[in-house]
Amino acid sequence: MADVFTREKRSAVMSRIRSHGNLDTELRMIALFRENGITGWRRRARVFGRPDFIFRRRKVALFVDGCFWHRHPGCRFAYTPKSRLKFWVRKFQNNVVRDRLVTRQLRNAGWHVIRVWECQLAAKHHAHVLRRVKAALA
Protein backbone atom coordinates (compact mmCIF):
# COMPACT_ATOMS: atom_id res chain seq x y z
CA MET A 1 0.00 0.00 0.00
CA ALA A 2 1.31 3.45 -0.88
CA ASP A 3 2.10 5.92 1.89
CA VAL A 4 -0.72 8.43 2.47
CA PHE A 5 1.75 11.17 3.41
CA THR A 6 4.15 13.08 1.21
CA ARG A 7 7.83 12.38 1.76
CA GLU A 8 8.20 15.65 3.72
CA LYS A 9 5.16 14.97 5.93
CA ARG A 10 6.34 11.38 6.65
CA SER A 11 9.76 12.76 7.63
CA ALA A 12 8.13 15.29 9.98
CA VAL A 13 5.96 12.60 11.59
CA MET A 14 8.86 10.18 12.05
CA SER A 15 11.14 12.87 13.49
CA ARG A 16 8.74 13.30 16.40
CA ILE A 17 9.10 9.68 17.49
CA ARG A 18 11.64 9.46 20.30
CA SER A 19 13.32 6.27 21.35
CA HIS A 20 14.15 5.42 24.92
CA GLY A 21 16.69 2.76 24.18
CA ASN A 22 16.27 -0.86 23.35
CA LEU A 23 14.40 -2.07 26.40
CA ASP A 24 15.07 -5.75 25.74
CA THR A 25 18.85 -5.37 25.68
CA GLU A 26 18.82 -3.02 28.67
CA LEU A 27 16.75 -5.55 30.65
CA ARG A 28 19.23 -8.30 29.78
CA MET A 29 22.05 -6.07 31.04
CA ILE A 30 20.16 -5.37 34.26
CA ALA A 31 19.62 -9.10 34.77
CA LEU A 32 23.35 -9.68 34.28
CA PHE A 33 24.16 -6.98 36.85
CA ARG A 34 21.74 -8.43 39.38
CA GLU A 35 22.82 -12.05 38.88
CA ASN A 36 26.40 -11.00 39.60
CA GLY A 37 25.84 -8.55 42.44
CA ILE A 38 26.87 -5.46 40.48
CA THR A 39 25.30 -2.44 42.13
CA GLY A 40 25.54 1.32 41.96
CA TRP A 41 24.30 1.73 38.40
CA ARG A 42 21.72 4.20 37.21
CA ARG A 43 19.70 4.50 34.00
CA ARG A 44 18.58 7.57 32.08
CA ALA A 45 21.13 9.82 33.76
CA ARG A 46 21.65 13.22 32.23
CA VAL A 47 25.17 12.64 31.05
CA PHE A 48 26.51 13.67 27.64
CA GLY A 49 25.74 11.01 25.04
CA ARG A 50 22.98 9.45 27.17
CA PRO A 51 24.70 6.27 28.30
CA ASP A 52 22.36 3.35 28.95
CA PHE A 53 23.92 2.90 32.40
CA ILE A 54 26.25 4.94 34.52
CA PHE A 55 28.18 4.23 37.68
CA ARG A 56 28.53 7.84 38.80
CA ARG A 57 30.95 7.27 41.71
CA ARG A 58 33.36 5.38 39.47
CA LYS A 59 32.68 7.61 36.44
CA VAL A 60 31.86 4.63 34.25
CA ALA A 61 29.47 5.03 31.32
CA LEU A 62 28.11 1.86 29.73
CA PHE A 63 26.37 1.74 26.37
CA VAL A 64 24.56 -1.33 25.04
CA ASP A 65 24.80 -0.81 21.28
CA GLY A 66 22.52 -2.58 18.83
CA CYS A 67 24.56 -4.43 16.23
CA PHE A 68 22.33 -3.23 13.37
CA TRP A 69 22.20 0.48 14.23
CA HIS A 70 25.77 0.87 15.46
CA ARG A 71 27.39 -1.41 12.83
CA HIS A 72 29.06 -4.18 14.79
CA PRO A 73 31.86 -5.27 12.40
CA GLY A 74 31.42 -8.82 11.16
CA CYS A 75 28.17 -9.41 13.07
CA ARG A 76 25.34 -11.16 11.25
CA PHE A 77 22.89 -8.61 12.66
CA ALA A 78 24.74 -5.68 11.06
CA TYR A 79 23.32 -6.22 7.58
CA THR A 80 22.54 -3.31 5.26
CA PRO A 81 19.04 -3.12 3.76
CA LYS A 82 19.01 -3.28 -0.03
CA SER A 83 16.36 -0.60 -0.54
CA ARG A 84 17.26 3.08 -0.14
CA LEU A 85 20.93 2.19 0.13
CA LYS A 86 22.21 5.80 0.22
CA PHE A 87 19.86 6.63 3.09
CA TRP A 88 20.96 3.64 5.17
CA VAL A 89 24.67 4.07 4.52
CA ARG A 90 24.48 7.73 5.54
CA LYS A 91 22.38 6.86 8.63
CA PHE A 92 24.83 4.19 9.76
CA GLN A 93 27.87 6.41 9.12
CA ASN A 94 26.32 9.20 11.19
CA ASN A 95 25.63 6.76 14.04
CA VAL A 96 29.23 5.50 14.05
CA VAL A 97 30.64 9.05 13.94
CA ARG A 98 28.34 10.12 16.79
CA ASP A 99 29.38 7.07 18.87
CA ARG A 100 33.05 7.97 18.43
CA LEU A 101 32.40 11.59 19.35
CA VAL A 102 30.47 10.64 22.49
CA THR A 103 33.16 8.19 23.56
CA ARG A 104 35.91 10.76 23.00
CA GLN A 105 34.05 13.52 24.85
CA LEU A 106 33.28 11.30 27.84
CA ARG A 107 36.86 10.05 28.05
CA ASN A 108 38.15 13.62 27.89
CA ALA A 109 35.82 14.41 30.80
CA GLY A 110 37.38 11.60 32.84
CA TRP A 111 34.82 8.86 32.25
CA HIS A 112 35.65 5.24 31.51
CA VAL A 113 33.45 4.20 28.56
CA ILE A 114 32.33 0.64 27.94
CA ARG A 115 30.43 -0.32 24.80
CA VAL A 116 28.75 -3.71 24.86
CA TRP A 117 27.32 -5.09 21.64
CA GLU A 118 23.79 -6.44 21.67
CA CYS A 119 24.99 -9.88 20.52
CA GLN A 120 27.41 -10.01 23.49
CA LEU A 121 24.45 -10.29 25.83
CA ALA A 122 24.06 -13.93 24.79
CA ALA A 123 24.91 -16.28 27.66
CA LYS A 124 28.13 -17.52 26.02
CA HIS A 125 29.61 -13.99 26.21
CA HIS A 126 28.53 -13.10 29.76
CA ALA A 127 31.92 -13.87 31.33
CA HIS A 128 33.69 -11.53 28.91
CA VAL A 129 31.20 -8.69 29.47
CA LEU A 130 31.41 -9.14 33.25
CA ARG A 131 35.23 -9.02 33.18
CA ARG A 132 35.12 -5.72 31.30
CA VAL A 133 32.55 -4.17 33.64
CA LYS A 134 34.31 -5.36 36.80
CA ALA A 135 37.68 -4.15 35.52
CA ALA A 136 36.23 -0.69 34.86
CA LEU A 137 34.67 -0.58 38.33
CA ALA A 138 37.83 -1.72 40.13
Image: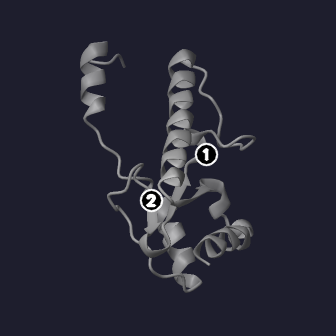
Label 1 neighbour load within 10 Å: few <14, some 14-19, many 20+: many
In this figure, which residue is indicated by the disc labeled 1?
67
- Determine whether the residue tagged by mark 2 lies in a helix, strand or loop: loop
Horizontal side of residue 42 vs 13, given as left or right: right
Residue 116 in the image, given as x and y percentages of width and height: 61, 58
The quarter of the image holding the C terminus is bottom right
Coloring scheme of the render? one colour
Residue 127 in the image, given as x and y percentages of width and height: 72, 73
- Which one is in front, 11 or 38? 38
Q: Which mark is residue 57?
A: none
Cα–Cα span, label 2 and label 1: 15 Å
Q: Nearer the viewer, mark 2 or mark 1?
A: 2
Residue 122 appears in the picture as rendered: yes
Q: Where, by quadrant of the figure, is residue 134 drawn? A: bottom right
- Amino acid found under the numbered disc labelled 2: Asp
Residue 101 in the image, given as x and y percentages of width and height: 51, 40
Q: Earlier in the sequence, mark 2 or mark 1?
A: 2
Residue 5 appears in the picture as rendered: no
Q: Establish if 111 lies above or below 31.
A: above
Q: Which residue is pictured at 74% across the width and 68% down the height? A: 124
Label 2 neighbour load within 10 Å: few <14, some 14-19, many 20+: many
Q: Which residue is pictured at 53% across the width and 24% down the height? A: 88
Q: Which mark is residue 52?
A: 2
Q: Which residue is pictured at 61% across the width and 45% down the height? A: 67
Residue at the outermost bottom position: 37
Q: Establish if 111 lies above or below 17.
A: below
Q: Establish if 42 lies above or below 93.
A: below
- Amino acid found under the numbered disc labelled 1: Cys
> Is label 2 in contact with label 1 (beta carbons under 8 Å)?
no
Residue 104 in the image, given as x and y percentages of width and height: 54, 46
The quarter of the image holding the N terminus is top left
